[in-house]
Amino acid sequence: MDDANVVKQSLHVQGLPIFETDIPYIQNICYTINQAQLSIHALPHLNMETPITVLDKGLIL
Amino acid sequence: MTDISFLTATELGPFIKSRQLSPIELTTHTLNRMDNFDSLLRTYISPLHDLALKQAKEAEDDIMRGEYKGPLHGIPIGIKDNYYSKGIRTTVGSKLFANFVPAKNATTVEKLLRAGGIMLGKQNMHELAAGSTGTNPFFGNTRNPWNIQYMPGGSSGGGTASLAAGLATLATGTDTFGSIRLPAAMCGVYGLKPTYGLVSTYGVFPSAMSLDTAGPMARSVSDLALMLQYMAGYDSNDPISLNLPVPNYMENLTKGIKGIKIGIPTYYLQGLAPDVERLFNRAVETLEYLGAEIKEVVIAELSMSTFSGYVTATGEASALHHNWLQTHAEDYSADIRTFFLASALTHTPQYIQAQQARRKMVKGFHEAFKYVDILLGPTIPITTPAYRKQWLDQNLAVIKRCLPFTSPVNLTGTPSLSVPMGLDQRGLPVGMQFIGNHLSEKQLLQVGHTWENTEPLTRHVIMA
């Protein structure tokens, strides 16, 4: 996933620019995110939560 | 009268009202300080001398006619350059918008001006409000007035540095993952990140829409309360604006904290720099001495802050900038570009999980608030770093260290007040944050005001 070529490919297919000097930093941020994702395993039943609700605010308050 | 450079709006107001201090005199004094010091500090992108003096003249004429508008009348205010200002360029700290001139004011700008505030200028910021140090390759790095070798923090670092240096009396900020509180901590001033939706963000350039919050920054808690009084309130132009009555934020300021239950999440005690830990322990003892009941609490859900914060902030910002990144990528500085582009490698399930984690975190906070009134932790775990030549590495490293401390309230929409807690061994300010339940700003300000009376900072910045 974090291989430099995969990063470049992912950017390319989305029409996003590739700056060679950016790649290690992008990899670093992705590594941080992927490491941090492990935290969600400590909290079970994440799928009990509705991720996004589209509801008129007047009904909520 | 004493030197007016560091007086607060609450202190200046009575002098202006009683005509002992003219708005023109106050504005001219502040503009002169900007002329003397801002080429070094770079707290303003667009100083507005002529407009400020015109507004000051109007304020003076009003007051001389007996038409005093209230405690903001004649008070000099710095406006962060991501708040739209009608007919005045609004760069968002970015080359991309270097020549953008809005046709309207942000709702909050309109409110502050209607209350008689004087707009000194548009203030410097970390590019696109998406960084935490205060570097800006297009408009110059803002410097920390306590020591110009050091960063002021970001993204609202122009505002907080101007307050610390006496180059504004009040300032507006925005906070997406810490941009009011982090620079407030680094510059030794006060900053409030309100409940999501309490202050209109209409006419504020977005960063990550589900996290973005506008709020006040000042040299005192009373001034924050004063500003919030004017900034808060329903705005039909803003789809996230809360349609609720605005309480009187000033009325409980002096009630003290006896019997208030303060919880310290164990999450906020991990990985603290030695000076932060020392000052925080001392602050906790002081709060206990003042009558607060202190206890540690465990909010396990906070461990998801880093994941949820990164995925949400980069994902939403990247979506907003997708087309500009495709066509104008060279107009972004490398730290912001890499931050946004990283989200191109995250996946939809990760974004969904990040939103589910936010719901869990809200429940975690609500559970904690069954047992305590407010929560307390250091604003950030580090002391203020000096600027390094490798600024790209440094900018991303500061986000990585600080986002876990600042983002939980953005992710949950809860309010947080950053206050100075003392000076580190190098003489640089360190901050802590009081976190409240949704819409508990009044209580946060009450606790913050009590803390402020302990005079956590023993001196002002000395500008020579």
Image (cartoon, rainbow, N blue to C red):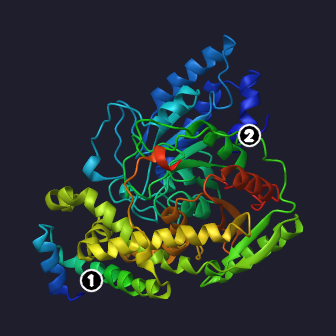
Looking at the picture, does residue B332 appear above or below residue B79? below
Question: Residue A6 location in percent, x, y?
Answer: 16, 84
For the residue carrying disc 1, how many other residues have a C-alpha within 10 Å: few (<14), some (14-19), or many (20+)? Answer: some
Question: Residue B245 location in percent, x, y?
Answer: 61, 38
Which residue is the site of mark 1?
A: A24
**Quadrant occupied by the N terminus of chain B:** top right
Question: Residue B348 location in percent, x, y?
Answer: 27, 72
Q: Which label is found at residue B395?
A: none
Dot 2 falls on a residue whose secondary structure is loop
Q: Nearer the viewer, residue B244 or B49?
A: B244
Q: How many marks?
A: 2
Question: Residue B176 location in percent, x, y?
Answer: 45, 59
Which residue is the site of mark 2?
A: B3
Q: Is residue B142 left or right of residue B32?
A: left
Q: Is residue B32 left or right of residue B347?
A: right
**Residue B220 is at least partly visible in this image:** no
For marks 2 and 1, give the CA distance: 51 Å
Q: Is residue B398 left or right of residue B15?
A: left
For the residue carrying disc 2, how many other residues have a C-alpha within 10 Å: few (<14), some (14-19), or many (20+)? Answer: few
Q: Residue at x 67, y 40 (%)?
A: B247
Looking at the picture, does residue B208 appear above or below residue B341? above
Q: Amino acid at mark 2?
A: Asp
Dot 1 falls on a residue whose secondary structure is helix
Q: Are marks 2 and 1 on the same chain?
A: no
**Residue B376 is at least partly visible in this image:** yes
Name the residue at the top extreme: B65
Q: Residue at x 30, y 36 (%)?
A: B101
Q: Amino acid at mark 1?
A: Pro
Q: Which chain is home to disc 2? A: B
